[in-house]
Image: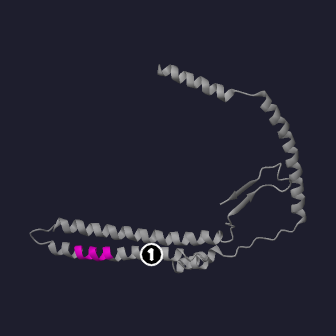
Amino acid sequence: MQLQDAFFVFIILLTVLFYKEPLAQDFVRENVSFKKLELITLALKDSIKANDSTDKEFRMTKSPTMAILYSLALPGAGQFYNKSYWKIPVIWAFGGYFIYEIVRNNNKYLDYREAFVSSQTIYGPYGDTRMKALRDFYRDQRDQFYLYAGLVYLINVVDAYVDAHLFDFDVSDKMKLGMSGNPGKLVNLNINF
């Protein structure tokens, strides 16, 4: 019974996919040729306008190289240069937390290393295995937080670079996409947030 149902669904899908309505095709053919003529006319008008007008060359307000150098020198300085002030406390909070964890885990690592070394005797040269396990754990934690701090530093630099590139990018709420000419005949897209 299931094979028959699958075959029935397959036949319906084929019928839907390959069904053609002749009236719709004729309407589309007529309108497509008219639209092509309009697009060619608009393209010619647009190219003539572009050649006649003198476009100003775009110059970036913020230098991405300077943003990188500032961020490399002091994390958050590139964001200050790019006027993204709200990102500075975020970078400093993550960086400060990771540095705190590095120092804390390093201190515990040193304490357990000393405890492990003092637990080694002539009669027990392998020492206390709990102290060794804790020593290794805190060393691994310290190294992991070094990695996290490095990632925050790298993300800080990349963010400053990208932010400097996009500083002059228009992020207004109203976006328009379309071609000049008769807006009623061409596709126009307006997005309002």
**Residue 110: within the magenta?**
yes
Circle 1 crowding by C-alpha within 10 Å: few under 14, some 14–19, many from 20: few
Residue 9 picture quarter = top right
Q: Position of residue 188 (x, y in %)?
A: 77, 53
> For the point 52% across and 24% down, which residue is it?
6
Q: Give 193 or 30, whichever is nearer the viewer.
A: 193
Which of 125 and 21 lies nearest the eye of the viewer? 21
Residue 129 pos. (x, y %):
18, 65
Name the image quarter holding the C terminus: bottom right
Kindly identify the amino acid type of the residue bearing the numbered disc 1: Ala
Horizontal relation, residue 5 to residue 181: left or right: left
- Tag 1 secondary structure: helix
In the rendering, at what x and y percent does residue 192 appear?
Answer: 68, 59
Instruction: Please tell me whether residue 160 is drawn above or below residue 1 in the rendered image.
Output: below
Residue at the disc numbered 1: 93
Q: At which x and y percent is residue 82?
A: 61, 76
Residue nearest the viewer, comparing 55 with 25: 25
Q: Is residue 67 magenta?
A: no
Image point (49%, 74%), residue name = 91
Give the overall secondary structure of the magenta segment: helix
Part of the protein shown in magenta: 104-112
Q: Is residue 120 above or below residue 4?
A: below
Q: Which residue occupies the extreme left position in the image?
A: 123
Q: With respect to residue 191, does 145 lie above or below?
A: below
